[in-house]
Amino acid sequence: MKWSTCLVTVWCVGIGGAGAVEPTADRAPLRLLRCPTSDGSVLESWQVASRTTLLTLLQIDDLAVGSPCDAAGRRAMPLHERTIDTRVRDEFTWHVVEIDARPDRRITVNVTIPRDARAGTCPAVICIHGHGGHRDVVYDETTVYHGFALPLARRGCVTLSTDVGQHDVQDAQRTLMGERLWDLMRVVDLAVMREEVDPRRIGCAGLSLGGEMAMWLGALDPRIAATVSSGFLTTMENMRVGHCMCWDFPGLQRRYEFADIYSLIAPRALQCQNGQQERLPGGFPVELAEQAMSEIRAAYCALGAEDAVELSIHPGGHEFDVAAALRFFDARLAK
Ligand SMILES: [Zn+2]
């Protein structure tokens, strides 16, 4: 496809077609808005158009456009933050706070603040759980998450986690994925507002559904400087068999593959993790991850950022590789 043709397709299918809600049965995996990878400037234009398209398909464009972030990454929509619990631990203080995700929706967020943190000096990481989990489980070393948020909290990061495992939409005008993603974008809003946080050094990480949400957050929130997506990189064809279908929403499969969504993160840092013991059906095997990563890597190469992306393969199964993530964040969120 010539680039001029590609851009016409982006505008006609991406913007004009995004407003129409398509019935599930009529969707076809056409991938009409595949990421163009031969030219950096065309890819950047595709990224801008695709973020607009996806926010519309997710049905959170009114929130994102209606309350945009200023140059410092701060959003005008008030958080109305209220602390409901505080516990002092050895290396950090643990807060449980409530914020407005929307004026009519409150969410609860865990926030850890390093002891002796000084203003503007701390990186922050949004830590995201998967199916059947909750906001506390990313701090639990006995689970498949191996408590990955704990060493981040202990080594001087502000960590934040909220609940994204719901399968009911509170606001009927949102998609489920849109409501989950908007909640996470509001957690980023909270991170930016914390005086300890350096807003240029905010990352996100998650496993399984959390790896999926990390993909979406990195793709659609440019304030995220580094993303770890564990146990999720695969193809939509695989996700149609043996998986909870909560990943889907009208209009997605017609336009994109997961590799395209990950390509929206470029040139910002991205680590995907997949375990060698992952199996089909229902898993996220390395072979499919490598297939998807070859496409993502092409996008990073088009932007001259091939060093910013990696597929980290570990010997385990559907679990978080803490050591690989710490190595990644130490390098990517350093001052
Ligand atoms: Zn689900």
Image (tube, rainbow, N blue to C red):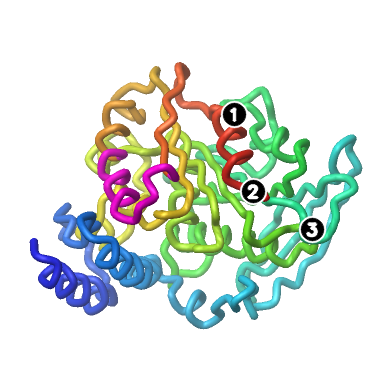
The residue lying at 70 percent from left, 38 percent from top is 152
Q: Nearer the viewer, residue 247 or 92?
A: 92
**In 3D space, how far apart are the residues under numbered discs 3 and 1 (Cα atoms)?**
24 Å
Residue type pointed to by label 2:
Val
Q: Is residue 276 above or below residue 97?
A: above
The residue lying at 18 percent from left, 72 percent from top is 7
The residue lying at 33 percent from left, 53 percent from top is 248
The residue singled out by tag 1 in the image is 322
Q: Is residue 201 above or below residue 20?
A: above
Q: Which numbered tag is attached to residue 196?
A: 3
The residue singled out by tag 2 in the image is 125
Judge the density around disc 2: few (<14), some (14-19), many (≥20) Cα neighbours within 10 Å: many
Stretch of the chain drawn in magenta: 293-308
Q: Position of residue 198 (x, y in %)?
A: 70, 59
Quadrant of the rendered image containing residue 98 = bottom right
Choose the circle earlier in sequence order: 1 or 2.
Answer: 2
Choose the circle earlier in sequence order: 3 or 1.
Answer: 3
Q: Quadrant of ligand 1?
A: top left
Q: Is residue 203 above or below residue 5?
A: above
Along the horizontal axis of the image, is 216 left or right of 128? left
Q: Position of residue 238 (x, y in %)?
A: 26, 36
Q: Position of residue 270 (x, y in %)?
A: 46, 45
Contact between labelled residues 2 and 1, with CB atoms less than 8 Å apart = no
